[in-house]
Image (tube, rainbow, N blue to C red):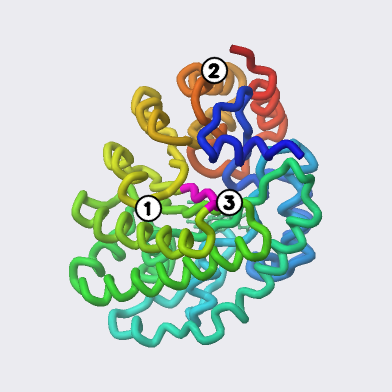
Amino acid sequence: MAEMKFLEVMRGRTVFPPPIWMMRQAGRYLPEYRETRKRAGSFLDLCYDPDMSVEVTLQPIRRFGFDASILFSDILVVPHALGRDLRFVEGRGPMMTPIKAQDVDALDGLLFHVNLEPVYETVRRLRRELPPETALIGFCGAPWTVATYMIAGHGTPDQAPGRLFGFSHPEAMEALLAKLAAQSAEYLIRQIDAGADAVQIFDSWAGVLDEASYEAWCVKPVAEMVRRVREKHPEVPIVGFPKGAGMLYDSYRAKTGITALGLDWSVPLPQARRLQALGPVQGNLDPMRLRAGGKALEEGVDRILEALGDGPLVFNLGHGITPETPIAHVEAMVQSVRGASR
Ligand code: CP3
């Protein structure tokens, strides 16, 4: 059997046209997702129900035939499985009771894998049901990004509560990140055991930190996670996505040991090329180009293929697709990428 295109790129090979998938590809822009989501009741019920999670994971694969499928879940199931409360409120996103410095030691990993068993079951079923040429990507949040929601209790524009917590309670922050790194590594290992072909670590809030905090709170815990996952599964590719890291992208791969770099749309293509000379990259179309469609979309796709098409590239957005995006634009993007010639 020919190797999956996504994995070929992860091994450092150039595949053209490149494999393509989208962050948040199972989501509200799809009517069939909205229908399943309504049936599920709450977003978390959807995440913990293998029948429905499998269904929504497969929806974008059926429609667009993407080269990779990402497990349907959320990064916040990790703190939830450690005993923190979590709700998703319509129009507001995740809500948690903010963790205090004195609560960190009480985080309880005893039922961690029991609580996450539905996720592992979803992965097992997905690997059986997906076409053999479609890679299955497992994922988790990076410790810093997960910690920002645990600390603030909800999303914020710049994660000021998380940053303030880190500077005010450096020891509690270090303990929290170490705990999350250890548990999240275990979580990824179990997803791989269950059949994930690769994993992605989402550090969506890497871009709000100064250099020293970025090193301590993003790079160091992710490096520890990579070390642990590689100990068990040395061959499985790990995609790192330190969104917004700017110049700090340059040293991320070497310092963390990840396989491939997920690039957000603000990474200039010349920098992306330099990063690609050192290994595979994934990205980085602005999701608003996709939403706008037409010329903005065509130009965005062309520029990325022109700059990065002759090296190991996984075509993706620079962040998740938004709910308002027309399906016809996704079809157009897939067509341009798949129909591209050099
Ligand atoms: O990419 C995929 O299709 C897989 C599923 C996935 C979801 N969340 C489903 C989801 C993945 C990989 C995530 C990751 C995630 N979750 C991140 C990191 C990536 C990123 O987008 O920055 C973060 C920060 C979260 C936390 C989270 N979950 C927030 C802030 C929100 C609310 C924002 C929103 O878009 O509503 C969610 C909810 C969420 N996670 C939805 C989906 C499909 C929408 C909820 C719904 O359907 O009601």
Q: CA distance from mark 3 to mark 2?
A: 27 Å
Which amino acid does the dot numbered 3 rest on? Ala
Which residue carries the number 2 mark? 302
State the extent of the magenta-drawn residues as a range: 235-239
Which amino acid does the dot numbered 1 rest on? Trp
User: Is tag 1's residue or tag 3's residue first in the polypeptide sequence?
Assistant: 3
Which residue carries the number 1 mark? 205
Q: CA distance from mark 1 to mark 3?
A: 22 Å
- Ligand 1 is within 8 Å of the C-beta of the residue at disc 1: yes
Query: In the figure, is residue 273 to the left or right of 123?
Result: left
Q: Could you tell me which residue is drawn at 19 percent across and 54 percent down?
A: 212
Which residue carries the number 3 mark? 198
- Ligand 1 is within 8 Å of the C-beta of the residue at disc 3: no
Q: Can the viewer see residue 9 in this picture?
A: yes
Give how far across and how far down residue 13 sits, in percent: 55, 31
Give how far across and how far down residue 197 sits, in percent: 63, 52
Within 10 Å of disc 3 (Cα), the crowding (few <14, some 14-19, many 20+) is: many
Q: CA distance from mark 2 to mark 1?
A: 28 Å
Give how far across and how far down residue 263 sits, in percent: 44, 38
316 relative to 147, above or below: above
Within 10 Å of disc 1 (Cα), the crowding (few <14, some 14-19, many 20+) is: many
Disc 3 is placed on an element classified as: strand
User: Is tag 3's residue or tag 2's residue first in the polypeptide sequence?
Assistant: 3
Query: In the figure, is residue 219 to the left or right of 78?
Result: left
Which amino acid does the dot numbered 2 rest on? Asp
Q: Nearer the viewer, residue 283 or 224?
A: 224
Quadrant position of ligand 1: bottom right
